[in-house]
Amino acid sequence: MDESSTGGPGSVLLPAVAPEVLAEAVENLSGRLRKKLDAAIEGCAAGAVRAADGSVGVRFGEDAVVTLRPGPSGVVTEADQAVCGCLLAPRCLHRAAVLGASPIADPEEPAPPAPGPDPVTGPGATDGPGAAPGAPAATTAASAVAGPAAGPGAAAEAGPGAGTGAGATAAPGAEGAAEGGALTASQVRAAAGLWGAAAEALAAGVTAGGAVVQAELLRAAHTARIAGLPRAEAAALRVVRGLRAARDRSAAQRLAELTGAFRELLYTAGLLASGAAGAGLTGAVRRSYEAGGSLRVYGLCREPVLSATGYGGVATHLLGVDGAHYSVSDVRPGGLARARGAGAASVALGGAVLDHAGLARGGLRVVGATVSPEGRLGAGRGVRATAVGGVAWGEGPTAALFSRPAAEAVAAMPAEGAEPGLLGCDVRVVGASGDHVLVRELTPGSPLLRLAPAHPHPELPHAANLRRIAGCPGLVLRVLGRPDLDRAATLRPLAVGPVPGAEHSLRLPPEWLGRADLGYDRLQGAHFPGDAEGLVTEVSAPAAGTDPLADSPLWRVRRLLEAGVAGGRRAVAEAARGAEPAALAAALRRAGFGSAAELAAALTAEADRRPRDAFGRLAEASAERYAWAWLAAAAHLAAAERSLVAASWA
């Protein structure tokens, strides 16, 4: 096989592989070869070579070459697209190892049921604030969903945004479930299989969650997709990707994120397998755009979008005259360079002659608008848009964003399952605390808030702008951002501006229309008051605000749960021995978290349980009972942390 001009061995990325192809390859291996699979996977990607016809080959010794020939989409979707030249093929270790080293592809989205204008600039759904709205991805579930408090079999409703509401296309195979709100027998069976695979993966943990464990999860996830359970499938894919990243010691992997992915997977699969869940928990495969008629929208700010999968771009947030929130996004492959440059790119919407910088400070009159359930404006062929003048913050429909205290706005937001909306507030800078800026609302009696970078990437100006703001205690400014509901009283600002009528506030150029996008505009010394004598600072400014979440002993429960994800059941069992369990329970009960103490004790007891058979021999402990105990503790922890975060805003 000839090397391509991309640089020879080690410079060619392996193509993505459909989950079911990898699962089948691992299933076909003998027990002896499965034990060698993880070692064989290491180093496969470094030896990849691309041929002139687009195929990718990996050589094993002198007699075996694995060749991947992806389809037009660039994904290996069929078993015969991965071949090996050895005598044991296709049931060989070489082929399974190369497939195991390849990235996992997102399931292909089915075509819409009926023809019509396609306003989508790119298939897929958003995956949180840092995900690519145009990236090819399946509908992803919420990253933090509380599990059933009553244990297995308890009925619970799906979180907001999890159902197949307006604009959502139900998953294939879910038609029977949609009628009467009941799940079909095939869906219950698929969910039960996924629950069992997830329980085994949790008991194994990262240390033992190798390719075989991941393949079982992928097999169960594919079965769930066929049965019409896209939300459960998406949760399983998140877990598999998290296990891979953790085993590869990727810098982008966070143990807390993998813990949340396990919680979501077990919660979803457990409720679906019980048969008591409604059809809303199945999820939706695709989100379609609906006719929105004629709209008049005004720009609020721009937000850089940078995903871990290599997509980059910009999302411009808009507000309708009725107070409804909209957005226009431009996200494509390109990573950081595209995220930085897209802020000044042209807006591809109905022929509007505007760039995103102008739209963020201007407005649009849209005729024949198409709108997604998330508020994203589509660029279909029938859409016509005309640029109109913008409004300053606090004028027109934007006045409602800054008219009520932040605590009241946060309390009105959905508790879970949906990305928090934007809120605005007027604050006074107190000082710096690490990479956070401590501020206090101008409303009397308001608590101390933290401003944290909306995106931590050092090449984006979020952090640098916040450092400049922190260096000017007493400054008053208007902030528009998104609350971080996982941290106490934390707001991630997207844009700032001067407070109307305030003497010591920001001094922005007139063409900025009274706002600075922290992800694109860079604040300079001329934008701050020149005379610091009139700045009103807090006489005894605290080094940091009271953080009920950090001050509570719930971190002990979180550490126990994360230890179970990292080291598996054995790590939790080890924690059950010695004096640590007693110290954990005592600290939790002293702080009033009696239920958390009981659930943590039940988890450690179940992890250390060693059943015996009728002859007194040690038997294999149930992974499912351990998974239920872990899920109960994780669900209670998530609910308790949300309550503490909500209280920190008051």
Image (cartoon, rainbow, N blue to C red):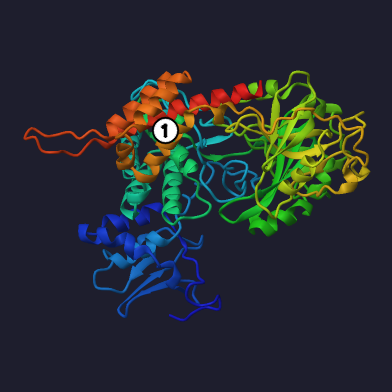
- On screen, 337 above or below 632? below
Quadrant location of the N terminus in the rendered image = bottom left
Residue at x 37% of width, y 25% of height: 599
In this view, the residue in front, 391 or 136, is: 391
Q: Is residue 615 left or right of residue 151?
A: left
- Left or right of residue 567: residue 54: right
The residue that appears at 50% across and 63% down in the rendered structure is 72
Q: Is residue 172 visible?
A: no
Query: Foreground residue, 554 or 316?
Result: 554
Q: Is residue 454 above or below residue 38?
A: above
Q: Position of residue 212 (x, y in %)?
A: 31, 53
Q: Callout 1 environment at 10 Å: few (<14), some (14 to 19), or many (20+)?
A: many
Residue 39 position in % (x across, y down): 32, 63
For the C terminus, give its image quadrant: top right
| Residue 114 is at least partly visible in this image | yes
Assign a secondary structure to mark 1. Answer: helix
From what the image shows, is residue 348 above or below residue 475? below
The x and y percentages for residue 295 are: 78, 33
> In this image, 447 relative to 71: left or right?
right
Residue at label 1? 268
Residue 355: x and y, percent?
Answer: 81, 50
Q: Is residue 649 left or right of residue 343?
A: left
Query: Callout 1, which amino acid?
Result: Thr
Q: Is residue 27 above or below residue 226?
A: below
**Residue at 58 percent of width and 26 percent of height:** 548
Residue in front for this viewpoint, 509 or 233: 509
The total number of labels drawn is 1
Which of the 4 image quarters holds residue 102?
bottom left
Q: Quadrant of residue 270?
A: top left
